[in-house]
Image: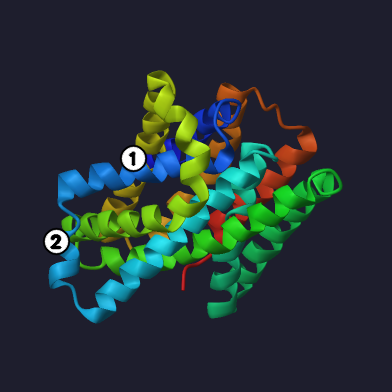
């Protein structure tokens, strides 16, 4: 539940920063903060010295996914309401469950989620097609994050967090060519730099640690059920922090996605 709150609270603060720092600059600050904290606190660089080739490849893949996922997510919420992006994020995991276990329950879950996303996209697609392109790209990357995250969490909470820290280092290297220039103005303003660091802590450090601890303790089916609160949490935080008031139609679409996530049975 803590992860659910921070998963969207940090991005809501990031939206407020977009007026001062370009979108990819905020994404760079988020990842850089997380990489620095994980690197210093967990000494994540030690992972590369003792890891197997398979472990290195998994962490490398997770790092690339984290970089792309953060970038596309921020590019999406710069154009679309937070609740809409949060709902679309879950279409990938639901589809995977339906493909892997073709039960009536999973097919119904997929149908509910697709209907919800169709309602949401029909509302705004004409005005923000690029926003939806980024949102659906983020949804695919979120699915990869869950799959890879469970793989690195399998060795236990502490080891999983160390590997997450190593992945954050990879993510920083991957996003730096695209984000460092956009983030540069923050280095001339201590308050902007502090705000960017706060976004990184709230968006990446706290929720990803919570995810790893939960993944190490809960079966994937139980973890997936807890994820069902995320689209609703995105709408709530968007309303409270950003004054993004969803219409009744948007609430219906988000509600259908929440129902689909809660109903699905994990592979």
Residue 90, image x, y percentages: 58, 56
Q: Of 178 and 62, which appears nearest the observer?
A: 178
Q: Of 162 and 110, which appears nearest the observer?
A: 162
Q: Of 30 and 220, which appears nearest the observer?
A: 30
Q: Work out whether mark 1 precedes mark 2 in sequence or the reverse, and give the earlier one.
A: 1
Q: Is residue 94 left or right of residue 183?
A: right
Q: Is residue 93 left or right of residue 79?
A: left
Q: Is residue 17 left or right of residue 114?
A: left
Q: Residue at x 71, y 38 (%)?
A: 251
The answer to whether 56 is drawn above or below residue 14 in the figure is below
Q: Residue at x 57, y 23 (%)?
A: 240
Q: Residue at x 14, y 69 (%)?
A: 49
The answer to whether 100 is drawn above or below residue 251 in the figure is below
Is the residue under label 2 in contact with that under label 1 (CB below 8 Å)? no
CA distance for labels 1 and 2: 19 Å
Mark on residue 33? 1
Question: Considering the numbered disc 1 on the image, is that residue within a helix, a strand or a loop?
Answer: helix
Q: Which residue is mark 2?
A: 46
Question: Considering the numbered disc 2 on the image, is that residue within a helix, a strand or a loop?
Answer: helix
Badge 1 crowding class, 10 Å Cα cut-off, few under 14, some 14 to 19, many 20 or more, is: many
Q: Of 59 and 241, which appears nearest the observer?
A: 59
Whether residue 16 appears in this view of the structure is yes
- Find residue 83 and report its image quarter: top right
Residue 35, image x, y percentages: 30, 47
Residue 67, image x, y percentages: 46, 55
Residue 254, image x, y percentages: 67, 44
Quadrant including the N terminus: top left
């Amino acid at each position: 539940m803590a992860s659910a709150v921070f998963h969207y609270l940090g991005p809501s603060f990031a939206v407020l920063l977009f007026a001062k720092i370009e979108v990819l600059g905020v994404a760079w600050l988020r990842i850089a903060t997380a990489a620095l904290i994980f690197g210093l606190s967990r000494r994540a660089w030690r992972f590369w010295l003792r890891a197997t080739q398979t472990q290195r490849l998994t962490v490398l893949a997770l790092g690339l996914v984290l970089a792309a996922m953060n970038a596309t997510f921020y590019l999406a919420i710069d154009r679309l309401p937070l609740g809409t992006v949060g709902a679309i994020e879950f279409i990938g995991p639901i589809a995977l469950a339906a493909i892997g276990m073709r039960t009536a329950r999973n097919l119904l879950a997929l149908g509910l989620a697709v209907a919800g996303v169709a309602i949401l996209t029909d509302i705004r697609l004409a005005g923000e097609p690029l926003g939806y392109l980024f949102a659906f790209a983020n949804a695919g990357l979120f699915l990869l994050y869950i799959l890879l995250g469970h793989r690195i969490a399998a060795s236990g909470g502490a080891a999983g967090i160390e590997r997450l820290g190593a992945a954050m280092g990879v993510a920083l290297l991957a996003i730096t060519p695209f984000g460092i220039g956009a983030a540069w103005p923050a280095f001339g303003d201590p308050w902007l730099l502090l705000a960017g660091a706060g976004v990184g802590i709230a968006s990446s450090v706290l929720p990803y640690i919570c995810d790893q601890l939960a993944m190490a303790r809960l079966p994937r089916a139980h973890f997936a059920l807890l994820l069902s609160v995320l689209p609703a949490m995105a709408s709530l935080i968007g309303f409270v922090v950003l004054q993004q008031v969803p219409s009744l139609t948007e609430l219906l679409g988000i509600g259908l996605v929440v129902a689909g996530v809660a109903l699905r049975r994990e592979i």
